[in-house]
Amino acid sequence: MDLFTLVAVFCLAVGGVALDAYQHPKTLAVKVVQRGDDTGTGLDRGLVNGIVVHELDRMARVPSLLAQPHIRPSEQKGVIEALGDATGTAAILDVVASAVQDPPDALNLGVYAEGGKLKAYVFGSVSGVPTRDGRFDLTDTQADGETAVDTVRRATVDGAARIDPYLAMLYLLSEQERTGQDRYATSALAIAQYAERRIPPSAAFLLLARLENIEGLVQIRRGNLDQASASFANGLGHVPASVVGPTPVILRLNKAFVDLARNDTDGAAALLAQVDESTNHLTRLVGMHIPTSEGSVIIINDEQVNFLRSASETIAAGIALRRGKPDDAETHLKTALQADPHQLGALSLLADIQAARGNQAAESALRGQVVQQSVTQSPYIEVALVHATLASTADTVTLKPSQYMMR
């Protein structure tokens, strides 16, 4: 190969790397490793591959403020791979690409039968999340009463959790909400315990703080409000005082929400004041560039900030109600609905106020809006107000189950 050809190949490789990075930033490459169609388990290779990709696709679709995953199944070739296959220079291009680009995170899964049970061997590599794993492997065995499909699904999440523990926990939390099964909460907390032992406190992306936030949300779902408040406080302990961004805002809003339900209105109000002071009433968040849980960068937009603003105003309304000020509460709720007309918590609390005033027609209309919008909304699930709704009776504010429908 002459010098001109080498230069041309190098330029093509660098261009391909740039295009790959644009199309699939921080890509997770997924592969089912059986060579033949028969896995020996009653599941052929195509079905296993479908289960794995489907589970990861569901995980990637969880509406999140702090995660933006990119998954590329094994059947889809990147620019470098396609170019190498077409020109017969795959080996050279791989070398050039590896010199200028970190390899994508990889998740590989194979299934086999042993001792009358299905086993899933999961292995891969991590480049973007500082869990000190580098390469990992684990084996999941089919549990008693568990279907083969559910074993493959569980193994997929376990493997994904080694690559992106935050996203895996979010997904399990959404499954807990959708199904009401506590086993998802148990799995989410196990991921947190594993990851927190392996992530250094100096890790980028405020990962420890974000994991503590999901732990708190799981505890809310379980009704453990004291533990939830402690988790949010621990999360804030991992955030440097100089950091302004959605992570500390979410943690403060969530702790304020839980502390209100624990009748600590002064503590809740102080947390809302800290949010306002540090972010100039959240306006500083608009347009902010933040690193996601898997290492890419996103820009916070107006819609996302309005979602947080609406949550803050709804919590402020709950504080006003607890202090016996329904008119102030109504003002906060109207502001919340101006920021986000789909805020079910604000609609529900406003309906409670109308009920207390004897306005049955207004209450009924608001309840109807809650039911209608709960079917269509996909809220950012890092926020506590999504997982429980404030309810008011006289001057008492309590929590009731979420009215959002997780899909």
Image: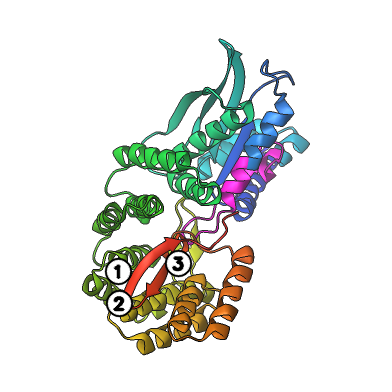
Question: For this rendering, which residue is in front, 291 or 22?
Answer: 291
Image spot of residue 142 (x, y percent):
54, 23
Q: Nearer the viewer, residue 26 or 389?
A: 389
Q: Residues within 10 Å of mark 2 (few under 14, many from 20)?
A: many
Q: Quadrant of the N terminus?
A: top right
Disc 1 versus disc 2: nearer the observer: 2
Give the x, y percent position of residue 303.
Answer: 53, 74
| Circle on res. 322 | 2
Q: In this picture, which residue range is highlighted in magenta?
A: 55-81
The answer to which of marks 2 and 3 sits earlier in the sequence is 3
**Which residue carries the number 1 mark?**
260
**Kind of element beneath mark 2:** helix
Closer to the eye: label 1 or 3: 1
Q: Please tell me in which quadrant of the rendered image residue 406 appears.
A: bottom right
Look at 36% across and 50% down and name the residue there: 215
Q: Is residue 334 positioned above or below 10 on the image?
A: below
As drawn, is 95 to the left or to the right of 345? right
Labelled pair 1, 2 in contact (Cβ < 8 Å):
yes
Instruction: Assign a secondary structure to mark 1.
Output: helix
Q: Residue at x 45, y 46 (%)?
A: 169
| Residue farthest along the right direction in this orientation | 86
Mark pair 1, 2: CA separation: 8 Å
Category of crowding for the residue at label 1, using alpha-carbon neighbours closer than 10 angstroms: few (below 14), some (14–19), many (at least 20): many
The residue wearing badge 3 is 289
Give the color scheme: rainbow, by chain, secondary structure or one colour. Answer: rainbow
Q: Quadrant of the C terminus?
A: bottom right
Identify residue type, mark 1: Leu
Q: Earlier in the sequence, mark 1 or mark 3?
A: 1
